[in-house]
Image (cartoon, rainbow, N blue to C red):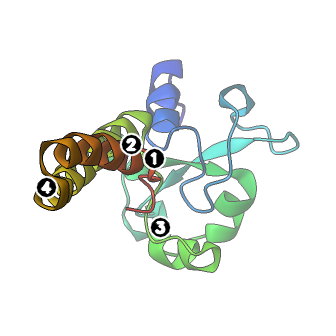
């Protein structure tokens, strides 16, 4: 199947330009370039051999080596050797998760600081907790 430039961009952006199996960085312009660093292809989450469709929600960017070695295996099985259980987050999803982490940690630290040290502890706790929460890698939380 041929993909339009817009479809390829949407698929690439789903994982913020990383292979959905090993998380290796991909280069947008190296689509289909097996012999180039950052070369990538489009993988069917549910393999075509098992009835997978060409619908965009079934398509992920994959480095050429992972794509060729995956075959008809499931994503979970293909990711296990790389210590991964899910696809990387998109840039938008990472941003949202960082904001959620900052808010969660800010509230926890503000509450703790307020209980222990009063109003000053509340303010400092909120600032420190928010900073710590924002710095957490959203892929790990």
C-beta proximity under 8 Å, tags 1 and 3: no
Query: In the structure shown, which secondary structural element does the residue marked by tag 2 occupy?
Result: helix
Local crowd size for mark 2, using a 10 Å CA cut-off: few (<14), some (14–19), many (≥20): some
| Residue shown at the point (79%, 38%) measured from the top left | 33
Residue 26, image x, y percentages: 68, 40
Local crowd size for mark 1, using a 10 Å CA cut-off: few (<14), some (14–19), many (≥20): few
Kindly identify which numbered label has been placed on residue 113: none
The residues bearing labels 3 and 2 have C-alpha atoms spaced at a distance of 47 Å
Q: Mark 3 points at which residue?
A: 49
Q: Name the residue under label 2.
A: 131
State left or right for residue 87 relative to residue 102.
right
Disc 2 versus disc 4: nearer the observer: 4
Kindly identify which numbered label has been placed on residue 111: 4
State left or right for residue 33 relative to residue 137.
right
| Residue shown at the point (36%, 64%) measured from the top left | 51
Q: Which of 118 and 23 is in front in this view?
A: 118
Residue 101, image x, y percentages: 29, 50
C-beta proximity under 8 Å, tags 3 and 4: no
Disc 3 versus disc 2: nearer the observer: 2
Residue extending furthest top?
5
Disc 4 versus disc 1: nearer the observer: 4
Q: Nearer the viewer, residue 10 or 84?
A: 84
């Amino acid at each position: 199947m041929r993909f339009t430039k817009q479809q390829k961009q949407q698929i690439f952006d789903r994982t913020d330009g990383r292979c959905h199996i090993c998380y290796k960085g991909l280069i947008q312009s190296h689509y289909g370039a097996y012999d180039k660093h950052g070369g990538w292809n489009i993988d069917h989450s549910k393999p075509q051999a098992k009835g997978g469709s060409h619908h965009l929600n079934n398509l992920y960017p994959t480095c050429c080596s992972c794509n060729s070695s995956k075959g008809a295996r499931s994503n979970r099985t293909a990711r296990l050797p790389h210590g991964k259980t899910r696809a990387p987050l998109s840039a938008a999803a990472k941003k949202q998760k960082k904001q959620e982490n900052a808010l969660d940690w800010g509230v926890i630290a503000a509450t703790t600081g307020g209980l222990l040290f009063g109003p000053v502890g509340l303010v400092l706790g909120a600032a420190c907790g928010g900073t710590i929460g924002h710095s957490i890698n959203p892929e790990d939380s």
